[in-house]
Image (cartoon, helix red, strand yellow):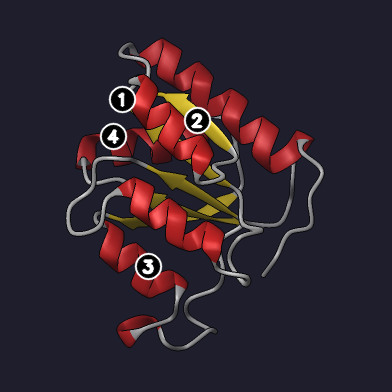
Amino acid sequence: MLSEPVYIMLVEDNPDHGELVVRTLAEHRVPNRIWHFTDGQTALDYLFRRGAYADPASSPRPHLILLDLRLPRVDGLEVLRIVKENRELRSIPVVVLTSSAAEQDVAGAYRNHVNSYLVKPVGYEEFNQLMGDMGFYWLAWNTKRLNG
């Protein structure tokens, strides 16, 4: 497992789901710092360093984005499209983490170059296992250049 903190951007409007992600990653000892955003517009402001996030020292680029699809202000598919169209941001892996298994959502995410699409299981044990596997894959097993 990595010894240096990994910066994770979590874009999830449900506070219970957000807390569950944070808790399960901690249980799996995934070393990380998580920035939790509850709407797509604020997440984009952070990524593009606008407003309160203008200083790069206090708004480092995430190594991984966990993105829900159903978000207020700017929905997840639009956030994904904007990230993947931007030259500076497109190399950041984006994992959709959503409760939707609808074919149109899956297809839309892959049309917009999502790196992975995960459907949130209903049960805690299954969710815990999914987060552990996701953490190990994207943050330990997957060979990539960590951008900062």
Identify residue type, mark 3. Answer: Leu
Secondary structure at numbered mark 1: loop
Identify residue type, mark 1. Answer: Ser
Residue 88 spot, x, y in % from top left = 62, 72
Between discs 1 and 2, the one toward the N terminus:
1
Q: Are marks 2 and 3 in contact (CB under 8 Å)?
A: no
- The residue depicted at 28 percent of the width and 34 percent of the height is 17
Identify residue type, mark 4. Answer: His
The residue tagged 3 is 44
- The residue depicted at 74 percent of the width and 50 percent of the height is 3
Between discs 1 and 4, the one toward the N terminus:
4
Secondary structure at numbered mark 2: strand
Between discs 1 and 3, the one toward the N terminus:
3
Identify residue type, mark 2. Answer: Tyr
- Whether residue 55 is visible to the viewer of this picture, yes or no, is yes
Between discs 3 and 4, the one toward the N terminus:
4
- The residue depicted at 74 percent of the width and 46 percent of the height is 2
Q: Quadrant of residue 109?
A: top left
- Whether residue 26 is visible to the viewer of this picture, yes or no, is no
Question: Compared to 77, does 39 lie above or below?
Answer: below
The residue tagged 2 is 117
Looking at the picture, tell me which residue is in the foreground, 86 or 99: 86
Quadrant the C terminus occupies: bottom right
Residue 73 spot, x, y in % from top left = 18, 59
How far apart marks 3 and 4 lie (CA) works out to 20 Å
The residue tagged 4 is 17
Quadrant the N terminus occupies: top right
The residue tagged 1 is 99
Between discs 2 and 4, the one toward the N terminus:
4
